[in-house]
Amino acid sequence: RNAVIAYKPLLRAAAYVDGQWVDGAAGRTIEVTDPFTGGLITTIPALEQAQVQAAIDAAARAFPAWARTPARERGKILRRLLDLIMAHRDDLARLITLENGKPLKEAYGEVDYGAGFVEVYAEEAPRALGEIIPAPVPGRKLYAEREPVGVSVAITPWNFPLAMLTRKFAPALAAGCTMVAKPASQTPLAALALAQLAEEAGVPPGVFSVVTGSAGMIGDLFTSSPIVRKLSFTGSTEVGVKLMAACAPTVKRLSMELGGNAPMLIFDDADLATAVDAAMIAKFRNCGQSCIAANRIYVQRGIYDAFVESFAQRVAAMKLGDGLEEDTDIGPLIDAPAVAKVNEHLEDALSGGGRLLVGGKGEGRMQPPTLVVDVAPGALLTREETFGPLAGLVAFDAYEDAIRLANDTPFGLASYVCSTSPTTIAHAGRDIESGMVGVNTGLISTPYAPFGGVKLSGIGKEGSSHGLDEYLNIKYVCHAGL
Ligand code: ADP
Protein backbone atom coordinates (compact mmCIF):
# COMPACT_ATOMS: atom_id res chain seq x y z
CA ARG A 1 0.00 0.00 0.00
CA ASN A 2 2.88 2.38 0.80
CA ALA A 3 4.52 1.51 -2.47
CA VAL A 4 1.31 2.43 -4.23
CA ILE A 5 1.40 5.82 -2.51
CA ALA A 6 5.12 6.53 -2.89
CA TYR A 7 5.10 6.24 -6.64
CA LYS A 8 2.03 8.32 -7.25
CA PRO A 9 3.12 10.79 -9.90
CA LEU A 10 0.01 12.86 -9.28
CA LEU A 11 0.20 13.03 -5.50
CA ARG A 12 0.75 16.67 -4.55
CA ALA A 13 1.19 17.87 -0.98
CA ALA A 14 0.89 21.58 -1.75
CA ALA A 15 -1.91 23.95 -2.72
CA TYR A 16 -1.96 25.51 -6.19
CA VAL A 17 -2.26 29.30 -6.22
CA ASP A 18 -1.69 31.52 -9.25
CA GLY A 19 0.31 28.82 -11.04
CA GLN A 20 2.55 28.11 -8.02
CA TRP A 21 2.62 25.14 -5.65
CA VAL A 22 2.53 26.67 -2.19
CA ASP A 23 2.74 25.59 1.44
CA GLY A 24 0.78 27.27 4.20
CA ALA A 25 2.43 30.57 5.19
CA ALA A 26 2.34 29.60 8.87
CA GLY A 27 3.40 26.03 8.13
CA ARG A 28 0.10 24.59 9.34
CA THR A 29 -1.07 21.38 7.69
CA ILE A 30 -4.06 19.05 7.43
CA GLU A 31 -3.64 15.27 7.47
CA VAL A 32 -5.16 13.28 4.63
CA THR A 33 -5.86 9.74 5.74
CA ASP A 34 -6.72 6.49 4.01
CA PRO A 35 -10.25 5.55 5.13
CA PHE A 36 -9.47 1.82 4.91
CA THR A 37 -6.32 1.70 7.07
CA GLY A 38 -6.75 4.99 8.90
CA GLY A 39 -3.09 5.65 8.02
CA LEU A 40 -1.64 8.92 6.82
CA ILE A 41 -1.41 9.40 3.05
CA THR A 42 0.12 12.87 3.15
CA THR A 43 -0.39 16.30 4.63
CA ILE A 44 -1.69 19.30 2.72
CA PRO A 45 -1.28 22.96 3.65
CA ALA A 46 -3.80 24.85 5.74
CA LEU A 47 -3.47 28.14 3.88
CA GLU A 48 -3.63 31.51 5.60
CA GLN A 49 -6.32 33.99 4.72
CA ALA A 50 -3.90 36.15 2.70
CA GLN A 51 -2.99 33.15 0.55
CA VAL A 52 -6.62 32.42 -0.27
CA GLN A 53 -7.13 36.10 -1.03
CA ALA A 54 -4.09 35.91 -3.33
CA ALA A 55 -5.80 33.11 -5.27
CA ILE A 56 -8.96 35.24 -5.67
CA ASP A 57 -6.88 38.26 -6.74
CA ALA A 58 -4.96 36.13 -9.24
CA ALA A 59 -8.26 34.86 -10.67
CA ALA A 60 -9.36 38.49 -11.10
CA ARG A 61 -6.09 39.44 -12.83
CA ALA A 62 -6.25 36.42 -15.13
CA PHE A 63 -9.91 36.91 -16.02
CA PRO A 64 -9.80 39.55 -18.80
CA ALA A 65 -7.27 37.68 -20.94
CA TRP A 66 -8.98 34.31 -20.37
CA ALA A 67 -12.40 35.74 -21.19
CA ARG A 68 -11.01 37.15 -24.46
CA THR A 69 -9.21 33.94 -25.39
CA PRO A 70 -11.22 32.54 -28.31
CA ALA A 71 -13.70 29.94 -27.08
CA ARG A 72 -12.25 27.39 -29.49
CA GLU A 73 -8.83 27.92 -27.94
CA ARG A 74 -10.27 27.39 -24.45
CA GLY A 75 -11.95 24.27 -25.80
CA LYS A 76 -8.65 23.00 -27.17
CA ILE A 77 -7.00 23.36 -23.78
CA LEU A 78 -9.86 21.39 -22.21
CA ARG A 79 -9.45 18.72 -24.87
CA ARG A 80 -5.74 18.44 -24.04
CA LEU A 81 -6.73 18.11 -20.40
CA LEU A 82 -9.19 15.35 -21.30
CA ASP A 83 -6.35 13.45 -23.00
CA LEU A 84 -4.11 13.93 -19.96
CA ILE A 85 -6.83 12.71 -17.58
CA MET A 86 -7.33 9.59 -19.67
CA ALA A 87 -3.56 9.03 -19.92
CA HIS A 88 -3.44 9.13 -16.09
CA ARG A 89 -6.62 7.10 -15.61
CA ASP A 90 -4.92 4.44 -13.45
CA ASP A 91 -3.14 6.94 -11.20
CA LEU A 92 -6.26 9.06 -10.74
CA ALA A 93 -8.43 6.04 -9.94
CA ARG A 94 -5.95 4.81 -7.31
CA LEU A 95 -5.63 8.27 -5.82
CA ILE A 96 -9.43 8.52 -5.50
CA THR A 97 -9.65 5.10 -3.86
CA LEU A 98 -6.82 5.97 -1.47
CA GLU A 99 -8.33 9.20 -0.23
CA ASN A 100 -12.02 8.26 -0.45
CA GLY A 101 -12.02 4.49 0.10
CA LYS A 102 -14.39 3.62 -2.75
CA PRO A 103 -13.83 0.37 -4.67
CA LEU A 104 -11.31 0.76 -7.47
CA LYS A 105 -13.84 -0.15 -10.17
CA GLU A 106 -16.01 2.73 -8.99
CA ALA A 107 -13.00 5.05 -8.90
CA TYR A 108 -12.38 4.19 -12.56
CA GLY A 109 -16.04 4.99 -13.19
CA GLU A 110 -15.55 8.33 -11.49
CA VAL A 111 -12.50 9.18 -13.59
CA ASP A 112 -14.48 8.47 -16.76
CA TYR A 113 -17.48 10.41 -15.46
CA GLY A 114 -15.28 13.31 -14.35
CA ALA A 115 -13.43 13.33 -17.66
CA GLY A 116 -16.79 13.39 -19.44
CA PHE A 117 -17.47 16.90 -18.12
CA VAL A 118 -14.16 18.09 -19.54
CA GLU A 119 -15.14 16.55 -22.88
CA VAL A 120 -18.64 18.07 -22.87
CA TYR A 121 -17.39 21.57 -22.11
CA ALA A 122 -14.50 21.36 -24.57
CA GLU A 123 -17.31 20.89 -27.10
CA GLU A 124 -19.71 23.42 -25.59
CA ALA A 125 -17.15 26.26 -25.26
CA PRO A 126 -17.72 27.63 -28.80
CA ARG A 127 -21.49 27.20 -28.57
CA ALA A 128 -22.23 30.10 -26.24
CA LEU A 129 -24.16 31.76 -29.03
CA GLY A 130 -25.84 35.14 -28.93
CA GLU A 131 -29.05 36.27 -30.61
CA ILE A 132 -30.31 39.13 -32.73
CA ILE A 133 -33.74 40.39 -31.75
CA PRO A 134 -36.04 41.98 -34.37
CA ALA A 135 -36.17 45.66 -33.38
CA PRO A 136 -39.58 47.07 -32.33
CA VAL A 137 -38.75 50.42 -34.03
CA PRO A 138 -36.82 51.35 -37.19
CA GLY A 139 -33.15 52.30 -37.05
CA ARG A 140 -32.20 50.02 -34.21
CA LYS A 141 -30.38 46.78 -33.82
CA LEU A 142 -31.00 44.72 -30.69
CA TYR A 143 -28.77 41.87 -29.73
CA ALA A 144 -27.96 39.69 -26.77
CA GLU A 145 -24.56 38.18 -26.10
CA ARG A 146 -23.44 35.59 -23.60
CA GLU A 147 -20.45 36.67 -21.55
CA PRO A 148 -18.62 34.95 -18.68
CA VAL A 149 -19.82 35.94 -15.21
CA GLY A 150 -16.25 36.60 -14.01
CA VAL A 151 -14.33 35.12 -11.12
CA SER A 152 -16.03 31.96 -9.85
CA VAL A 153 -15.43 29.80 -6.81
CA ALA A 154 -16.26 26.15 -6.17
CA ILE A 155 -16.65 24.25 -2.91
CA THR A 156 -16.78 20.50 -3.41
CA PRO A 157 -17.53 17.43 -1.24
CA TRP A 158 -15.57 14.24 -0.57
CA ASN A 159 -17.88 11.64 -2.16
CA PHE A 160 -16.72 12.21 -5.78
CA PRO A 161 -13.46 14.12 -5.29
CA LEU A 162 -12.70 14.46 -9.01
CA ALA A 163 -16.08 14.53 -10.74
CA MET A 164 -17.74 17.04 -8.40
CA LEU A 165 -14.95 19.43 -9.32
CA THR A 166 -14.71 18.85 -13.09
CA ARG A 167 -18.47 19.44 -13.42
CA LYS A 168 -17.82 22.97 -12.11
CA PHE A 169 -14.30 23.62 -13.37
CA ALA A 170 -14.90 22.58 -16.99
CA PRO A 171 -17.98 24.75 -17.71
CA ALA A 172 -16.41 27.67 -15.83
CA LEU A 173 -13.26 27.61 -17.93
CA ALA A 174 -15.17 26.87 -21.14
CA ALA A 175 -17.36 29.93 -20.51
CA GLY A 176 -14.31 32.14 -19.98
CA CYS A 177 -14.53 32.37 -16.20
CA THR A 178 -11.60 31.87 -13.88
CA MET A 179 -12.06 29.66 -10.81
CA VAL A 180 -10.72 29.14 -7.31
CA ALA A 181 -11.72 25.75 -5.89
CA LYS A 182 -11.80 24.44 -2.34
CA PRO A 183 -12.00 20.66 -2.17
CA ALA A 184 -13.21 18.82 0.91
CA SER A 185 -10.35 18.49 3.40
CA GLN A 186 -10.86 14.69 3.58
CA THR A 187 -10.23 14.31 -0.17
CA PRO A 188 -8.14 17.14 -1.62
CA LEU A 189 -5.75 14.99 -3.67
CA ALA A 190 -7.83 14.47 -6.81
CA ALA A 191 -8.40 18.25 -7.03
CA LEU A 192 -4.67 18.93 -6.68
CA ALA A 193 -3.95 16.30 -9.32
CA LEU A 194 -6.46 18.03 -11.60
CA ALA A 195 -4.62 21.33 -11.06
CA GLN A 196 -1.37 19.68 -12.08
CA LEU A 197 -2.88 18.23 -15.24
CA ALA A 198 -4.64 21.52 -16.04
CA GLU A 199 -1.30 23.31 -15.83
CA GLU A 200 0.22 20.71 -18.14
CA ALA A 201 -2.68 21.15 -20.57
CA GLY A 202 -1.94 24.87 -20.82
CA VAL A 203 -4.38 26.51 -18.40
CA PRO A 204 -2.63 29.84 -17.66
CA PRO A 205 -1.58 30.83 -14.11
CA GLY A 206 -4.41 32.29 -12.04
CA VAL A 207 -7.15 30.87 -14.27
CA PHE A 208 -7.54 27.88 -11.94
CA SER A 209 -6.33 27.68 -8.35
CA VAL A 210 -6.95 25.04 -5.69
CA VAL A 211 -6.89 26.26 -2.10
CA THR A 212 -6.86 23.97 0.93
CA GLY A 213 -7.50 24.76 4.56
CA SER A 214 -10.24 25.78 6.95
CA ALA A 215 -13.67 25.49 5.32
CA GLY A 216 -15.06 28.27 7.48
CA MET A 217 -12.28 30.74 6.67
CA ILE A 218 -12.22 29.96 2.96
CA GLY A 219 -16.03 29.95 2.77
CA ASP A 220 -16.15 33.38 4.45
CA LEU A 221 -13.58 34.85 2.04
CA PHE A 222 -15.28 33.35 -1.00
CA THR A 223 -18.75 34.51 -0.07
CA SER A 224 -17.88 38.01 1.16
CA SER A 225 -15.53 38.91 -1.70
CA PRO A 226 -17.03 41.47 -4.08
CA ILE A 227 -14.61 40.19 -6.76
CA VAL A 228 -16.18 36.74 -6.74
CA ARG A 229 -19.28 36.80 -8.97
CA LYS A 230 -20.32 33.16 -8.78
CA LEU A 231 -20.33 30.38 -6.22
CA SER A 232 -20.95 26.76 -7.13
CA PHE A 233 -21.38 24.46 -4.16
CA THR A 234 -22.02 20.75 -3.76
CA GLY A 235 -22.63 19.56 -0.22
CA SER A 236 -25.19 19.54 2.53
CA THR A 237 -28.32 21.69 2.50
CA GLU A 238 -27.31 22.99 5.92
CA VAL A 239 -24.02 24.45 4.68
CA GLY A 240 -25.52 25.47 1.33
CA VAL A 241 -28.17 27.60 3.02
CA LYS A 242 -25.48 29.39 5.05
CA LEU A 243 -23.43 30.02 1.93
CA MET A 244 -26.47 31.39 0.07
CA ALA A 245 -27.18 33.80 2.92
CA ALA A 246 -23.53 34.86 3.01
CA CYS A 247 -23.60 35.54 -0.75
CA ALA A 248 -26.72 37.70 -0.57
CA PRO A 249 -24.99 41.04 0.23
CA THR A 250 -22.82 40.73 -2.89
CA VAL A 251 -25.64 39.21 -5.02
CA LYS A 252 -23.60 36.39 -6.53
CA ARG A 253 -24.78 33.91 -9.11
CA LEU A 254 -25.33 30.60 -7.32
CA SER A 255 -25.36 26.93 -8.24
CA MET A 256 -26.33 24.71 -5.34
CA GLU A 257 -26.28 20.93 -5.46
CA LEU A 258 -27.55 20.08 -2.00
CA GLY A 259 -28.89 17.12 -0.09
CA GLY A 260 -31.27 14.55 -1.50
CA ASN A 261 -33.67 11.96 -0.14
CA ALA A 262 -34.40 10.01 -3.30
CA PRO A 263 -37.37 7.64 -3.34
CA MET A 264 -37.48 4.54 -5.51
CA LEU A 265 -40.99 3.31 -6.40
CA ILE A 266 -41.29 -0.28 -7.55
CA PHE A 267 -44.73 -1.04 -8.93
CA ASP A 268 -46.40 -4.46 -9.20
CA ASP A 269 -45.94 -4.53 -12.98
CA ALA A 270 -42.19 -3.87 -12.81
CA ASP A 271 -39.85 -6.34 -14.43
CA LEU A 272 -38.31 -8.02 -11.38
CA ALA A 273 -34.75 -8.36 -12.67
CA THR A 274 -34.74 -4.75 -13.90
CA ALA A 275 -36.06 -3.47 -10.58
CA VAL A 276 -33.46 -5.43 -8.59
CA ASP A 277 -30.63 -4.15 -10.81
CA ALA A 278 -31.93 -0.59 -10.50
CA ALA A 279 -32.22 -0.80 -6.72
CA MET A 280 -28.74 -2.31 -6.37
CA ILE A 281 -27.03 0.46 -8.25
CA ALA A 282 -29.19 3.30 -6.95
CA LYS A 283 -28.64 2.20 -3.36
CA PHE A 284 -25.13 0.79 -3.23
CA ARG A 285 -23.16 2.77 -5.82
CA ASN A 286 -20.30 4.59 -4.09
CA CYS A 287 -21.07 2.58 -0.92
CA GLY A 288 -24.36 4.49 -0.69
CA GLN A 289 -22.50 7.80 -0.37
CA SER A 290 -24.17 9.61 -3.21
CA CYS A 291 -26.63 12.49 -3.05
CA ILE A 292 -28.85 10.71 -5.58
CA ALA A 293 -28.70 7.36 -3.74
CA ALA A 294 -32.12 5.71 -3.40
CA ASN A 295 -32.67 6.52 0.25
CA ARG A 296 -36.11 4.92 0.53
CA ILE A 297 -37.35 1.99 -1.50
CA TYR A 298 -41.14 1.67 -1.76
CA VAL A 299 -42.35 -1.64 -3.13
CA GLN A 300 -45.96 -2.43 -4.08
CA ARG A 301 -47.47 -5.42 -2.25
CA GLY A 302 -47.98 -7.63 -5.31
CA ILE A 303 -44.26 -7.79 -6.12
CA TYR A 304 -42.99 -7.27 -2.57
CA ASP A 305 -42.08 -10.86 -1.59
CA ALA A 306 -40.46 -11.69 -4.90
CA PHE A 307 -38.47 -8.46 -4.82
CA VAL A 308 -37.31 -9.05 -1.24
CA GLU A 309 -36.07 -12.54 -2.05
CA SER A 310 -34.14 -11.55 -5.13
CA PHE A 311 -32.77 -8.27 -3.74
CA ALA A 312 -31.63 -9.94 -0.49
CA GLN A 313 -29.56 -12.47 -2.45
CA ARG A 314 -27.81 -9.70 -4.34
CA VAL A 315 -27.13 -7.61 -1.23
CA ALA A 316 -25.73 -10.66 0.59
CA ALA A 317 -23.40 -11.40 -2.34
CA MET A 318 -21.58 -8.06 -2.12
CA LYS A 319 -18.02 -8.08 -0.80
CA LEU A 320 -16.97 -5.61 1.87
CA GLY A 321 -13.29 -4.76 2.00
CA ASP A 322 -10.29 -2.80 0.80
CA GLY A 323 -11.20 -0.56 -2.12
CA LEU A 324 -7.82 -1.23 -3.73
CA GLU A 325 -8.71 -4.93 -4.16
CA GLU A 326 -10.30 -5.61 -7.52
CA ASP A 327 -13.29 -7.62 -6.29
CA THR A 328 -14.41 -5.26 -3.50
CA ASP A 329 -17.97 -3.99 -3.90
CA ILE A 330 -18.25 -1.92 -0.72
CA GLY A 331 -15.25 -0.13 0.76
CA PRO A 332 -14.95 1.79 4.02
CA LEU A 333 -17.20 4.79 4.58
CA ILE A 334 -15.48 8.16 4.71
CA ASP A 335 -15.21 8.25 8.51
CA ALA A 336 -16.54 6.72 11.74
CA PRO A 337 -19.43 9.23 12.15
CA ALA A 338 -20.71 8.09 8.74
CA VAL A 339 -20.96 4.52 10.08
CA ALA A 340 -22.56 5.78 13.31
CA LYS A 341 -25.27 7.51 11.23
CA VAL A 342 -26.03 4.30 9.34
CA ASN A 343 -26.29 2.45 12.64
CA GLU A 344 -28.66 5.07 14.02
CA HIS A 345 -30.90 4.63 10.96
CA LEU A 346 -30.66 0.84 11.25
CA GLU A 347 -31.61 0.78 14.94
CA ASP A 348 -34.49 3.15 14.32
CA ALA A 349 -35.82 0.99 11.45
CA LEU A 350 -35.59 -2.17 13.60
CA SER A 351 -37.23 -0.58 16.61
CA GLY A 352 -40.12 0.51 14.35
CA GLY A 353 -40.85 -3.09 13.31
CA GLY A 354 -38.33 -3.60 10.49
CA ARG A 355 -36.75 -7.03 9.97
CA LEU A 356 -33.01 -7.36 9.38
CA LEU A 357 -32.36 -9.72 6.45
CA VAL A 358 -28.74 -9.01 5.51
CA GLY A 359 -25.79 -7.32 7.23
CA GLY A 360 -26.08 -5.38 10.44
CA LYS A 361 -24.20 -2.95 12.62
CA GLY A 362 -20.95 -1.50 11.26
CA GLU A 363 -17.69 -1.05 13.11
CA GLY A 364 -15.02 1.60 12.74
CA ARG A 365 -15.30 2.79 9.17
CA MET A 366 -16.59 -0.52 7.79
CA GLN A 367 -20.32 -0.80 7.25
CA PRO A 368 -21.50 -4.10 5.74
CA PRO A 369 -24.19 -3.87 3.06
CA THR A 370 -27.41 -4.15 5.02
CA LEU A 371 -31.05 -4.83 4.16
CA VAL A 372 -34.05 -4.18 6.40
CA VAL A 373 -37.54 -5.03 5.19
CA ASP A 374 -41.02 -4.12 6.43
CA VAL A 375 -39.77 -0.67 7.45
CA ALA A 376 -42.42 1.72 8.81
CA PRO A 377 -43.23 4.60 6.43
CA GLY A 378 -42.14 7.25 8.95
CA ALA A 379 -38.77 5.66 9.83
CA LEU A 380 -35.69 7.87 10.13
CA LEU A 381 -34.16 6.33 7.00
CA THR A 382 -37.11 7.64 4.97
CA ARG A 383 -36.68 11.17 6.30
CA GLU A 384 -32.91 11.76 6.43
CA GLU A 385 -30.16 10.90 3.98
CA THR A 386 -28.51 7.69 5.24
CA PHE A 387 -25.43 8.13 3.02
CA GLY A 388 -24.33 4.55 3.50
CA PRO A 389 -25.01 0.97 2.34
CA LEU A 390 -28.26 0.44 4.24
CA ALA A 391 -31.38 -0.36 2.20
CA GLY A 392 -34.80 -0.12 3.83
CA LEU A 393 -37.90 -1.45 2.08
CA VAL A 394 -41.34 0.00 2.73
CA ALA A 395 -44.47 -1.67 1.32
CA PHE A 396 -47.26 0.34 -0.36
CA ASP A 397 -50.70 -0.40 -1.78
CA ALA A 398 -51.90 2.16 -4.34
CA TYR A 399 -50.22 4.53 -6.82
CA GLU A 400 -51.45 7.56 -4.85
CA ASP A 401 -49.84 6.21 -1.66
CA ALA A 402 -46.50 5.85 -3.41
CA ILE A 403 -46.57 9.40 -4.77
CA ARG A 404 -47.64 10.81 -1.42
CA LEU A 405 -44.77 9.01 0.34
CA ALA A 406 -42.29 10.00 -2.37
CA ASN A 407 -43.16 13.69 -2.12
CA ASP A 408 -43.38 13.79 1.67
CA THR A 409 -39.95 15.43 1.97
CA PRO A 410 -38.52 18.93 1.65
CA PHE A 411 -35.90 17.52 -0.75
CA GLY A 412 -36.24 16.92 -4.49
CA LEU A 413 -33.05 15.81 -6.16
CA ALA A 414 -33.59 12.43 -7.83
CA SER A 415 -36.29 9.79 -7.85
CA TYR A 416 -36.63 6.36 -9.43
CA VAL A 417 -39.60 4.49 -10.86
CA CYS A 418 -39.73 0.85 -11.90
CA SER A 419 -42.76 -0.18 -13.95
CA THR A 420 -43.61 -1.58 -17.38
CA SER A 421 -46.75 0.52 -17.73
CA PRO A 422 -46.31 3.59 -19.96
CA THR A 423 -49.17 5.26 -18.09
CA THR A 424 -47.68 4.68 -14.65
CA ILE A 425 -44.29 5.88 -15.87
CA ALA A 426 -45.77 9.02 -17.45
CA HIS A 427 -47.89 9.82 -14.40
CA ALA A 428 -45.04 9.25 -11.96
CA GLY A 429 -42.68 11.34 -14.09
CA ARG A 430 -45.23 14.14 -13.84
CA ASP A 431 -46.27 13.73 -10.21
CA ILE A 432 -42.93 13.26 -8.44
CA GLU A 433 -41.33 16.48 -7.23
CA SER A 434 -37.68 16.06 -8.14
CA GLY A 435 -35.14 17.46 -10.55
CA MET A 436 -34.34 14.05 -12.06
CA VAL A 437 -36.25 10.80 -12.58
CA GLY A 438 -34.75 7.42 -13.39
CA VAL A 439 -37.19 5.05 -15.09
CA ASN A 440 -36.26 1.36 -14.90
CA THR A 441 -32.70 2.29 -14.05
CA GLY A 442 -30.73 3.28 -10.99
CA LEU A 443 -27.92 4.92 -12.93
CA ILE A 444 -28.88 8.33 -14.30
CA SER A 445 -25.76 10.48 -13.93
CA THR A 446 -24.00 11.43 -17.14
CA PRO A 447 -22.13 14.58 -18.13
CA TYR A 448 -24.43 14.86 -21.16
CA ALA A 449 -27.64 15.48 -19.17
CA PRO A 450 -28.70 18.29 -16.81
CA PHE A 451 -28.17 17.26 -13.18
CA GLY A 452 -29.82 19.25 -10.40
CA GLY A 453 -32.59 19.39 -7.85
CA VAL A 454 -35.69 21.28 -6.76
CA LYS A 455 -36.95 22.26 -3.31
CA LEU A 456 -34.19 22.06 -0.65
CA SER A 457 -32.02 20.04 -3.03
CA GLY A 458 -30.74 23.09 -4.80
CA ILE A 459 -30.64 25.56 -7.63
CA GLY A 460 -29.16 25.24 -11.09
CA LYS A 461 -27.93 22.46 -13.37
CA GLU A 462 -24.61 20.79 -13.94
CA GLY A 463 -23.73 18.88 -17.08
CA SER A 464 -25.01 19.36 -20.66
CA SER A 465 -25.34 22.77 -22.32
CA HIS A 466 -27.36 23.95 -19.32
CA GLY A 467 -24.27 23.61 -17.15
CA LEU A 468 -22.49 26.21 -19.30
CA ASP A 469 -25.29 28.75 -18.81
CA GLU A 470 -24.56 28.74 -15.08
CA TYR A 471 -21.30 30.57 -15.85
CA LEU A 472 -22.69 33.00 -18.44
CA ASN A 473 -24.55 36.29 -18.14
CA ILE A 474 -26.71 37.57 -20.96
CA LYS A 475 -25.82 41.09 -22.02
CA TYR A 476 -28.38 42.95 -24.10
CA VAL A 477 -27.13 45.71 -26.42
CA CYS A 478 -29.49 48.24 -28.00
CA HIS A 479 -27.76 49.98 -30.89
CA ALA A 480 -29.77 53.05 -32.03
CA GLY A 481 -29.35 55.58 -34.82
CA LEU A 482 -28.87 53.12 -37.63
P1 ADP B 1 -20.67 16.69 3.38
O1 ADP B 1 -21.82 16.07 4.12
O2 ADP B 1 -20.55 16.28 1.95
O3 ADP B 1 -19.36 16.68 4.13
P2 ADP B 1 -20.65 19.54 3.79
O4 ADP B 1 -21.67 20.51 3.34
O5 ADP B 1 -20.34 19.47 5.24
O6 ADP B 1 -21.16 18.17 3.20
O7 ADP B 1 -19.28 19.77 3.04
C1 ADP B 1 -19.19 20.01 1.66
C2 ADP B 1 -18.07 21.00 1.40
O8 ADP B 1 -18.38 22.22 2.08
C3 ADP B 1 -16.71 20.57 1.92
O9 ADP B 1 -15.71 21.05 1.04
C4 ADP B 1 -16.62 21.27 3.25
O10 ADP B 1 -15.29 21.49 3.63
C5 ADP B 1 -17.30 22.58 2.91
N1 ADP B 1 -17.84 23.30 4.08
C6 ADP B 1 -18.30 22.81 5.23
N2 ADP B 1 -18.69 23.80 6.07
C7 ADP B 1 -18.48 24.95 5.41
C8 ADP B 1 -18.69 26.36 5.71
N3 ADP B 1 -19.22 26.74 6.86
N4 ADP B 1 -18.34 27.26 4.78
C9 ADP B 1 -17.83 26.86 3.60
N5 ADP B 1 -17.62 25.60 3.25
C10 ADP B 1 -17.94 24.65 4.13
Image: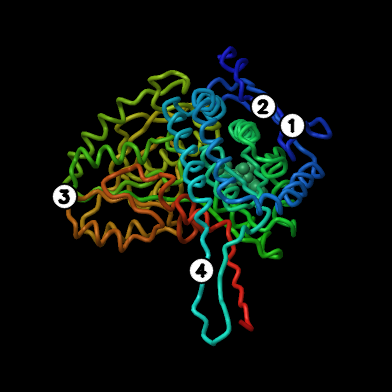
First in residue order: circle 1 vs circle 3 = 1
Residue 131 got which mark?
A: 4
x 58%, y 82%: residue? 140
Q: CA distance from mark 3 to mark 2?
A: 52 Å
Q: Could you tell me the amino acid type at mark 3? A: Asp
User: Which circle, 3 or 2, is nearer the viewer?
Assistant: 2
First in residue order: circle 3 vs circle 2 = 2
**Residue furthest right as drawn:** 26
x 62%, y 39%: residue? 184
User: Which circle, 4 or 1, is nearer the viewer?
Assistant: 4
Given residues 436 and 209, the one toward you in this image is 209
Query: Secondary structure under badge 4?
Result: strand
User: Which circle, 4 or 3, is nearer the viewer?
Assistant: 4
Q: Is mark 4 within 8 Å of ligand 1?
A: no
Q: Is residue 247 left or right of residue 374?
A: right
Residue 12 got which mark?
A: 2
Q: Position of residue 94 (x, y in %)?
A: 52, 23
Q: Is residue 219 left or right of residue 472?
A: right
Q: CA distance from mark 2 to mark 1?
A: 9 Å
Q: Is residue 264 above or below residue 26?
A: below
Q: CA distance from mark 4 to mark 1?
A: 42 Å
Give neighbour class at mark 4: few <14, some 14-19, many 20+ (Cα, 10 Å). Answer: few
Q: Residue under circle 3? A: 269
Q: Residue under circle 1? A: 21
Given residues 58 and 482, the one toward you in this image is 482
Q: Could you tell me the amino acid type at mark 1? A: Trp
Q: Position of residue 3 (x, y in %)?
A: 58, 12
